[in-house]
Amino acid sequence: MSQRRKFIKQSLMGSALFLPGVAASCAQVSPKENTSGEKPLILSTWNHGIPANADAWAKLQETGSILDAVEAGVRNTELDMENLSVGLQGLPDREGITTLDASIMTGDGSCGTVAFVRQVKHPISLARAVMEKTPHVMLVGEGARQFAIAEGFPMEEEKLSPKAQEAYDKWKVTSQYKPIINIENHDTIGMIGIDANGKLAGSCTTSGLAYKMHGRVGDSPIIGAGLFVDDEVGAATATGLGESIIRICGSFLIVELMRQGRTPQEACEEAVKRLVAKNKGINDIQAGFLAINKYGEVGAYAVHPGFNYAQATSQGNVLIDSKSHFTP
Ligand code: ASP
């Protein structure tokens, strides 16, 4: 890590609001969403967004590229051994195999995604390689894995992390197929950011729904569902039950609503309303959206309480509780 990057990271981490515990406990009263339109601005889903934002912020200072920033940020989460929903340490599918989905996009329409990929330590970087080095947008499964090997990506042997193995062994006792979302407040990481000049980029990476059917792909690697970015308007990302988000093209919907004049908050609320209307039995599941417009205004909304996001500006890196459609 360069000295400069180390300094920025340390100074961000030194602020009281930066501490996840502190920020979380006063999130209702203290941290405020960015209404002043301050840029640069980086947002990401859930508690793990705090360290991810710190890395993204440091990368932005280092290279000046918002694309580099959103890639670097979520790479942090992809390596977080405590995290059971992102990266190779994530919970496996029903067969006991962890498969990963990721997407990356910039505001000029460039995008790359990978889905149902195994053994790749940094699916977000693989998605970026798809975007930059192939004529395609999406690679899946064995093809994506082979591309990773050919590109010299770090790979890992197929083996569950001790935490994931323990959870999987417990799950096998009943083997009930029940989506587990919004447990322990950490899920997919979706990150969207805008630089000082108004350039936007976003990233999204996940091990997907725990105990999914082998081959299942969620919203995260689907451009327009888990992520959508357009410099003319803004960006949006999603977390939660992927099927419900794909059904309404959630992130694309939010960007299009903003294009028609809605604020990011209004657009997120409308998307959740639509999601609830189009998904029967939604009471049991969680989905949340995060949005930013080209003016640096922020929106967030979820089906149920419990969704939060991390917001980094020059003022610090804070956790903010999202409002929700249903109340406790
Ligand atoms: N959206 C992810 C999926 O459905 C799950 C999550 O947010 O954890 O794969």
Image: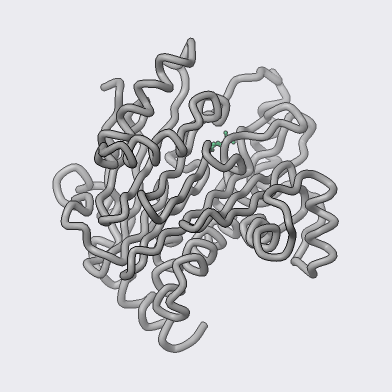
- In the rendered view, would you say 158 is above or below 263? below
Q: How many labels does the image show?
A: 0
What is the x, y in percent for residue 152?
Answer: 79, 70
* Picture quadrant where residue 141 is located: top right
Quarter holding ligand 1: top right
- In the rendered view, would you say 214 is above or below 223? above
Please tell me which residue is depicted at 82% across the width and 56% down the height of the picture. 157
What is the x, y in percent for residue 50?
Answer: 38, 58
- In the rendered view, would you say 243 is above or below 16? above
What is the x, y in percent for residue 116?
Answer: 73, 42
Relative side of 93 to 8, left or right: right
Please tell me which residue is depicted at 45% across the width and 44% down the height of the picture. 237
What is the x, y in percent for residue 243?
Answer: 57, 26
Where's the C terminus, which quadrant?
top left
* Picture quadrant where residue 179 is located: top right
Relative side of 117 to 285, left or right: right
